[in-house]
Amino acid sequence: MSDAGSNETDLSVRVANEVAAAKGVDPTDLDPLTAFVDLESVDTLVANSTERIRIEWSHDGLHVEIDSDDGVRVW
């Protein structure tokens, strides 16, 4: 699991790396994540919240979770 980054690019890279690792492929072989979720908005929500935030979605047969306390998880 990776820690959620402080900007959209870092968050995008972390999610892409975790999804790619779960699928056993290179991150560059994935469809752009922005086609599925607005990571800039997710990052803004996580960065500006005073409460714990958890966002989950399905991506290409995998479950993706971004947690403001625990980072990025994919399974």
Image (cartoon, rainbow, N blue to C red):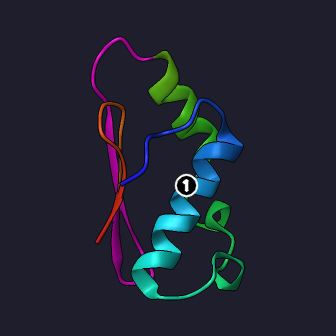
Residue 74, position in %: x, y? 34, 66
Rendered-image quadrant of the N terminus: bottom left
**Magenta part of the protein: which range?**
49-64
The correct choice, above or below, for 22 with respect to 9 in the image is below
Q: Is 57 left or right of 39, judged from the image as shown?
A: left
Measuring 68% from the left and 86% from the top, which residue is drawn there? 29
**Which of 19 and 31 lies nearest the eye of the viewer?**
19
Measuring 71% from the left and 45% from the top, which residue is drawn there? 9
> Residue 58 sits in which quadrant?
bottom left
> Residue 34 sits in which quadrant?
bottom right
Residue 50, position in %: x, y? 35, 11
Measuring 58% from the left and 46% from the top, which residue is drawn there? 11
> Residue 14 sits in which quadrant?
bottom right
**Residue ID for mark 1:** 14
The correct choice, above or below, for 57 with respect to 28 in the image is above
Residue 32, position in %: x, y? 69, 70
57 within the magenta span: yes
Question: What amino acid type should be assigned to the residue bearing mark 1?
Answer: Arg
The correct choice, above or below, for 15 with respect to 27 in the image is above
